[in-house]
Image: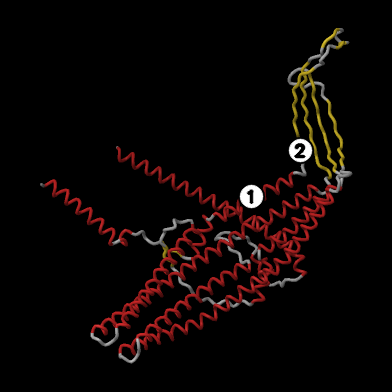
Amino acid sequence: MKMIRKKHGKRAALLGSLLTFLLVPAAFAAETMPIDLATAISRSYATHADIRKAEYQLDEARANYNAARESFGPTVTLTHSTGRGGYWDERWNTAHTLYSKGIDNTYSNTVSMTVPIYTGGQLEGARDEAKANYRSSVLGEELAYINLKKNVTDAYYTLLSAIDSEKVCRQSVADLQDHLKNVQAQYDVGVVAKVDLLRSQVELTNAQQQLIQAQNTYDNAEAALNNYMGLPHGTKLQPTEVLQYNLYDGTMEDCIAYGLTHRLDLQQSKLQVDYAKGALNAAKSGWRPYVNGVASNNWTQGNWPGDDNENWAIGLNLSMNVFDSGVTGSKVDAAKASLMQAEESYRQDADTVRLDVRNCYNNLREAEKRINTTKLAVAEAEEDYRIAQVRYANGVGTNTDVMDAEVALTTARNNYNTAMYDYNTSHNALLTSMGVEARPAGYDTGEKHVRLRYTKQKYNTTFEDTQAKAINDRVKAYEKARDARRKTDSDVTAAKAAKAADKAEAKAEQKAADKA
């Protein structure tokens, strides 16, 4: 009997624990993680694959550029051959005064060096192509930071907007619940008709449906931001900021001028022109002679390792394509067409930058105007809802008036939140369209004064001549900054490894002390 009671007691305790877990899930929920925009961006820089892919693409482009430059140097080749041979039929061997098939071994070793002296522009063209691609990859790494910052910022603003939308829906549900209690009380004493009670219940149900949708939108926005930061998708976030209106006083003309100077994808388009020029030069090399300097030393012997009978040679090799059925001409025509495409694309991209900046700027100003109007509309809707409630409570107004006022209030609040969200995302889009840099902390290139100087310069044909130097300076600055950042990352990794080793050592010492 005691054992049965003991088992029942354990089951009751287990059942109680299970009910507690199901009824009070908040007690077992994971703690929320405070997050701000700067931290979200920093975490994304450290973990997101787009940054790593851009770095590897840059490594690949650098290796290809190095290979193109090193192709101008000498090539040394060591060749060894081993063979055995003779005649099928016996022949008179004068040296040995007898007939034999002359079967013997042959060992030879050759060291040769070839130096390209003139390739008709083939190596130069390949080098120019690789150089343009490398510079484009340097800018591409910085562009990856800019695009990732925009995406993370938009995701963060989406989360803030989802929080505001959920608050509006919760407030709407709370208001309708209070109103339903009032209608229920009046219906119970026969003051209002049942249609008022039913209409109030329907409106409350609709508001609850909107709240469920808002909660789902929040969960999705939270998961999206976690994905950018490399966190588990179910991590609970607690943003420490709210959507705010920060005045942007830049003019459209200044924004366009800045974008034409700093948009990295526009500079990449310019580098595509350089790439096409290199390809054209390489294609024309088929019409020109090739001159190589050669030097060699050869050893031949019938016994291993074949290091006797030495002879050397030095000279020039010249070759030229006299007739190839028009293949070279067709390649040159194709390269010219590619160059024209690149030049047209560059001009089109410049117009696209102008249009992109203009659209983002107009969207920013449009959202700014909506903020002012919707803010006033919220205050008016709140007053209208309060009056409708008072009139209905005093028997002067109708239940429909209250419902309409509540819908108008919810709409006004949502419109204000949407305007705030659109303003912040439009400001973020404007900065991205202008090419505003987005490096992480400690990633300084030291060329800020250069950027500011070019910012004040209007885009014209004169500036286009100086753009090649600007791109060159920027590429060098990014290279220097990237090396410094990688060194910092390696130092941080080493510090973490040392800390982990110290921790493991302390743990081992503690375990040994416990055993003793």
Q: Answer yes or no: do the residues labelled 1 and 2 have beta carbons within 8 Å?
A: no
Other residues around mark 1 within 10 Å, as few (<14) / some (14–19) / many (≥20): some
- State the image quarter where residue 197 is shown: bottom left
> Closer to the camera, 12 or 136?
12
Judged from the image, the secondary structure of the residue bearing numbered disc 1 is helix
- State the image quarter where residue 253 is shown: bottom right
* Residue that label 2 marks: 75
Q: Residue at 76% of width from left, 35% of height from top?
A: 76
Question: In the displayed structure, would residue 455 be above or below residue 276?
Answer: below
User: Looking at the picture, which amino acid does disc 1 mark?
Assistant: Asp
The circle drawn on residue 59 is: 1
Q: Where in the figure is residue 123, as x and y percent of width and height?
A: 78, 47
In the picture, measured across the screen, residue 383 lies left or right of residue 426, that is: left
Other residues around mark 2 within 10 Å, as few (<14) / some (14–19) / many (≥20): few
> Closer to the camera, 343 or 428?
343
Between the residue at mark 1 and the residue at mark 2, the CA separation in whole angstroms equals 24 Å
- Colouring method of the image: secondary structure
Q: Where in the figure is residue 251, as x and y percent of width and height?
A: 63, 77
Q: Residue at 63% of width from left, 49% of height from top?
A: 59
User: Looking at the picture, which amino acid does disc 2 mark?
Assistant: Thr
Q: Where in the figure is residue 136, as x and y percent of width and height?
A: 68, 57
Q: Where in the figure is residue 450, as x and y percent of width and height?
A: 67, 66
